Amino acid sequence: MERDIVALRQFGGGVKLLKIELSRGMRELVAIDEVAKHKIAFGTFECEQPGPVLKSVALIATPAGPLVYLDDLRYVPEIYKTKIEIKDDGNISNFQIFHDGQLIFGLFFDAKFGIGLHPYNQTREDIDFYFWLSKNIDDPGFYKAYTRDLPYVD
């Protein structure tokens, strides 16, 4: 069997990792101590609904550049072609990803405002993965940072 399972840390910390089988997009939340630290890939995820139908967005650094899993959809963002919008309506926010102007994914989530897990995390970009991603998707440095070797979970 081809090695294609990676593990990611949750944005802003947390006690769970997200394991993703890259070939099929199968996702599973696991305890952080189930994966050796050196086997955790560079990237992050956010989960809005745990359980049998996992609602999550994951960003993974790969040798070819950033790779995003939008629930079950595997998406390779492209600088200046990928756009992200966040629309806030009270305590609910709407995260939308567009490719060449076409909506490819949307997700409603509880708005993330306030102070994060660490006292220095005080801006929305520090605590809201979706907002952070929206602010970095057009930055060439983002694509460079998310181009790296990929450690696989054994």
Image (tube, rainbow, N blue to C red):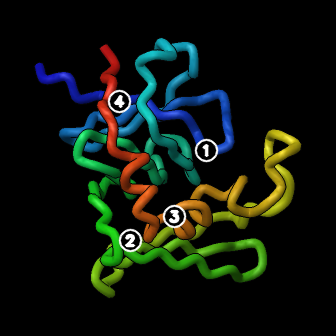
Q: CA distance from mark 2 to mark 1?
A: 20 Å
**Mark 3 = which residue?**
136
Q: Residue at x 31, y 39 (%)?
A: 26
**Mark 2 = which residue?**
105
Q: CA distance from mark 4 to mark 1?
A: 16 Å
**Mark 1 = which residue?**
11
Residue 17 picture location, percent across and down: 52, 30
Residue 32: mark? none
Of discs 2 and 4, which sits in the foreground? 4
Residue 33 picture location, percent across and down: 56, 14
Residue 38 picture location, percent across and down: 45, 16
- Labelled pair 3, 2 in contact (Cβ < 8 Å): no
Q: CA distance from mark 3 to mark 2?
A: 18 Å
Task: Check disc 3: other Cα within 10 Å, few if <14, some if 14-19, many if 20+.
Answer: some
Compared with residue 64, is residue 7 higher up or lower down, i.e. above or below?
above
Task: Check disc 2: other Cα within 10 Å, few if <14, some if 14-19, many if 20+.
Answer: some
- Labelled pair 2, 1 in contact (Cβ < 8 Å): no
Q: Earlier in the sequence, mark 2 or mark 4?
A: 4
Compared with residue 8, is residue 55 higher up or lower down, i.e. above or below?
below
**Mark 4 = which residue?**
6
As shown in the figure, which amino acid type bears the numbered disc 1? Answer: Phe
- Labelled pair 2, 4 in contact (Cβ < 8 Å): no
Q: Residue at x 79, y 61 (%)?
A: 123
Q: Dot 4 lies on which element?
A: strand
Q: CA distance from mark 2 to mark 4?
A: 22 Å
Task: Check disc 1: other Cα within 10 Å, few if <14, some if 14-19, many if 20+.
Answer: some
As shown in the figure, which amino acid type bears the numbered disc 4? Answer: Val
Q: Earlier in the sequence, mark 2 or mark 1?
A: 1
As shown in the figure, which amino acid type bears the numbered disc 3? Answer: Asn
Q: Quadrant of the N terminus?
A: top left
Q: Dot 3 lies on which element?
A: helix
Q: Dot 1 lies on which element?
A: loop
